[in-house]
Amino acid sequence: MTALPPGSTIGILGGGQLGRMLAMAAAQLGYRCHIYAPPGDNIACEVAAICTIAEYHDLAALKDFAESCDVVTFEFENVPVDPMKSIIGLVPIHPPLKALEVAQDRVVEKEFVRKLGGKTAAFAVARTEIEVEDAVAAVGTPAILKTIRMGYDGKGQVRVSAQSELASAWRRAGGQPLIAEAMVRFEAEFSIILVRGTDGEIRYWDSSRNVHEDGILATSCLPSGPLIESQQVAARKMAGDVADALDYVGVFTAEFFASAEGPLFNEIAPRVHNSGHWTIEGAETSQFENHIRAICGLPLGSTATIADRVEMQNLIGDDGDRWVQLLGDPAANVHLYGKAEARAGRKIGHVTRLYR
């Protein structure tokens, strides 16, 4: 791929905070961004050159968008794939639509990883309500039921610890096809975040220890500790194999459990990732800049960590009320996303601290 020159237009599907930070990184490299998103609180539009507000299934608007761009990427993995197929051939799309197809179906995702030699928790499928009992029986209790499609930040998930809880599980999960997963005994959660260029070169950032609260990432910290560090090589191999199999271009994330049996794969995100926000201040090149570099055919930047210790904390809901206090802390690198409403469970910003 010939490198896209500065002044080219990058199309971003999705208008959230990841698109916002991608557009900011693109601007530093001299690119213009065109955001395409359905109606909503599209905070990415505030920092982009162009913004199209239209439904993803509006093929005419999607075609106009594609023809205005030199490359198209995603900030959201639940962009519907079928309408995106209509712009294949009009503009290069990175990462490939295959990555979205795999990530959007938890069963396909786990089978894809298993075929490449990856380890996952035991799972079974319940595509109808009457199959829930058999699926949970296959993996045992306690178990976690997740919607096969959609769902993130703890949404679309129901934990069951006894057979008596199954009667309401289907309804509580939204009444749609589910995957039942055995509860995994693990010491920590971590991510492998990599960037893969158009030439197949892969670079990895150090893995952070991730702590979730109510299914939402609360903190990511480095160094991650001896257990995660001992499993990082194997997890990187697994994530790299998935990226290669998808012929992936851009930043790619795979989430893992650090367990006594080694790294257990949880899920992938074909995009920049919340657990990589620390790279803005804590790495030689952030995940956002390297994603732009990769999809534009530029040389990849160094992913080296530049501090002895890094802590990233999400600001969720009314955490943002502390913005004046946080800005008064000289160690705090504060990022506020400009969202119109700070609802409970909604990420409205993050803070990163470096310790040398």
Image (cartoon, rainbow, N blue to C red):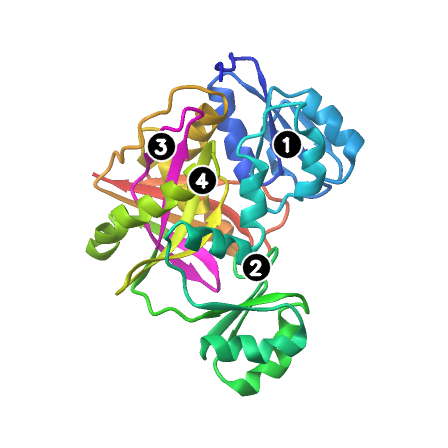
In the rendered structure, the answer to whether residue 151 lies left or right of residue 198 reads right
Mark in front: 3 vs 2:
3
Q: Position of residue 130 (x, y in %)?
A: 66, 78
In the image shown, does 160 or 6 lie closer to the viewer? 160
Precedes in sequence: disc 3 or disc 4: 3
Res 328 seen here = no
Mark in front: 4 vs 2:
4
SS type, badge 3: strand
Q: Which mark is residue 202?
A: 3
Q: Amino acid at mark 1?
A: Cys
Q: Position of residue 320 (x, y in %)?
A: 50, 50
Which residue occupies the extreme front position in the image? Answer: 115
Q: Amino acid at mark 3?
A: Ile
SS type, badge 1: helix
SS type, badge 4: helix
**Residue at 38% in and 45% down:** 239
Q: Which residue is mark 4?
A: 245
Mark in front: 4 vs 1:
4
Precedes in sequence: disc 2 or disc 1: 1
Q: Which residue is mark 1?
A: 45
The reply to whether the magenta stretch includes residue 212 is yes
Region rendered in magenta? 190-219
Quadrant in the picture for the C terminus: top left
Q: Position of residue 199 (x, y in %)?
A: 41, 24
- For label 2, the crowd category at 10 Å Cα-Cα, with few meaning under 14, some 14 to 19 and many 20 or more, is few
Res 52 seen here = yes
- Give the alpha-carbon distance from disc 3 to disc 2, as whole Å: 37 Å
Q: Position of residue 231 (x, y in %)?
A: 25, 53
